Image (cartoon, rainbow, N blue to C red):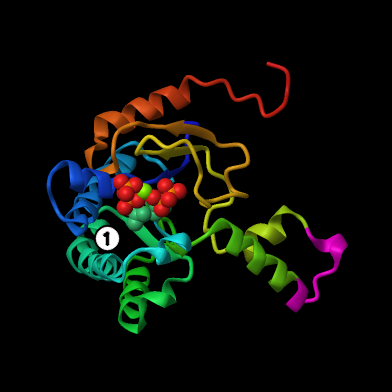
């Protein structure tokens, strides 16, 4: 299949919780269940990588209680889901400044990455946590300067190597929740992505919806600037 690298902005957990008279944290928990189903479908469809936006640099502005519930959810999700991910040959990688979630979470993330490490995984699952596209670009610029890389030596590979983002190119970016913006997600890597905005809230997004997005992608004509 032509479709190899997918990214998702998993938006709408808060509205879903409100709609169902539940607490915000229950919305986020339901969001993890939705992700589990989409990961399974990626494995089924032999997608190579799935990169998801779990927490942005801007999300630190949220109430402490919500940030803490997300922090707990990360640790619990690793505890509950890691074995099944490994069974499916999924390699898990986190990226962003997730160190700000504390030592305990940091250690748990490193444990998950090490335990699921594979040279040739069925699927690379990349989770953006405390990530922001602008921050990533600023860090790349800082690294270029710190490493004294000559201007003439800078090319796409330099940027990809220095970026926190594990994937260099995203074929399809999906955002649920109805908003038509990128919210500081993968800026450089989505340069030529097809972008699908879906009205459904993330916890309601199903395999069926995902298959519809894949089909739409496969029907799109990708010219990359060339003549058709
Ligand atoms: C996305 O859902 C998850 C995170 C940003 C952590 P939201 O919590 O933003 O849900 P809405 O947009 O308020 O519905
Ligand atoms: C984007 O959603 C971040 C994640 C899904 C993790 P937000 O809800 O934070 O984005 P805005 O505030 O609508 O732009
Ligand atoms: Mg939101």
| Residue positioned 41% across, 44% down in the render | 8
Q: Is residue 65 above or below residue 154?
A: below
Q: Quadrant of residue 34?
A: top left
| Residue positioned 64% across, 65% down in the render | 162
| Residue positioned 36% across, 80% down in the render | 102
- Along the viewing direction, whichever of 84 and 14 lies nearer the viewer: 14
- Along the viewing direction, whichever of 17 and 214 lies nearer the viewer: 17
Question: Residue 73 at x, y = what percent?
Answer: 23, 65
Q: Is residue 202 magenta?
A: no
Relative placement, left or right, of 146 versus 17 is right
**Count of marks placed on residues:** 1
Q: Which segment did they paint magenta?
A: 145-154
Q: Is mark 1 within 8 Å of ligand 2?
A: no
Q: Quadrant of residue 136?
A: bottom right
- Along the viewing direction, whichever of 84 and 73 lies nearer the viewer: 73
| Residue positioned 30% across, 82% down in the render | 104
Work out which residue is located at the far left of the displayed protein and give it. Answer: 21
Work out which residue is located at the far bottom of the displayed protein and give it. Answer: 103
Secondary structure state at the residue bearing disc 1: helix
Question: Residue 189 at x, y = what percent?
Answer: 59, 48
Residue 171 in view of the camera: yes
Query: Which image quarter holds the C terminus?
Result: top right
Query: Which image quarter holds the N terminus?
Result: top left
Q: Is residue 6 above or below residue 226?
A: below
Question: Residue 174 at x, y = what percent?
Answer: 42, 38
Label 1 crowding class (10 Å Cα cut-off): few <14, some 14-19, many 20+?
Answer: some
Residue 39 in view of the camera: no
Residue receiving disc 1: 86
Relative placement, left or right, of 6 versus 168 is left
Question: Residue 118 at x, y = what percent?
Answer: 39, 63
């Amino acid at each position: 299949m032509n479709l190899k690298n997918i990214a998702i902005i998993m938006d709408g957990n808060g509205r879903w919780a409100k709609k169902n008279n539940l607490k915000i944290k229950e919305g986020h928990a339901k969001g993890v269940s939705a992700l589990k189903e989409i990961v399974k479908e990626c494995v089924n469809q032999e997608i190579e990588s799935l990169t998801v936006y779990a927490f942005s640099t801007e999300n630190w502005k949220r109430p402490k209680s919500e940030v803490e519930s997300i922090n707990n959810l990360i640790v619990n999700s690793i505890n509950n889901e890691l074995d099944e991910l490994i069974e499916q040959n999924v390699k898990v990688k986190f990226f962003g400044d997730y160190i700000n979630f504390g030592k305990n979470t940091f250690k748990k993330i490193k444990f998950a990455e090490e335990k699921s490490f594979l040279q040739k995984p069925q699927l690379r699952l990349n989770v953006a946590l405390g990530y922001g596209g602008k921050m990533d670009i600023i860090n790349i610029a800082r690294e270029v300067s710190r490493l004294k890389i000559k201007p003439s030596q800078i090319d796409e590979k330099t940027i990809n190597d220095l970026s926190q983002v594990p994937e260099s190119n995203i074929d399809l970016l999906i955002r649920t929740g109805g908003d038509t913006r990128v919210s500081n997600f993968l800026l450089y890597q989505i340069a030529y992505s097809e972008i699908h905005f879906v009205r459904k809230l993330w916890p309601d997004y199903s395999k069926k919806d995902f298959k519809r997005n894949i089909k739409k992608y496969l029907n799109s004509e990708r010219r990359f600037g060339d003549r058709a």
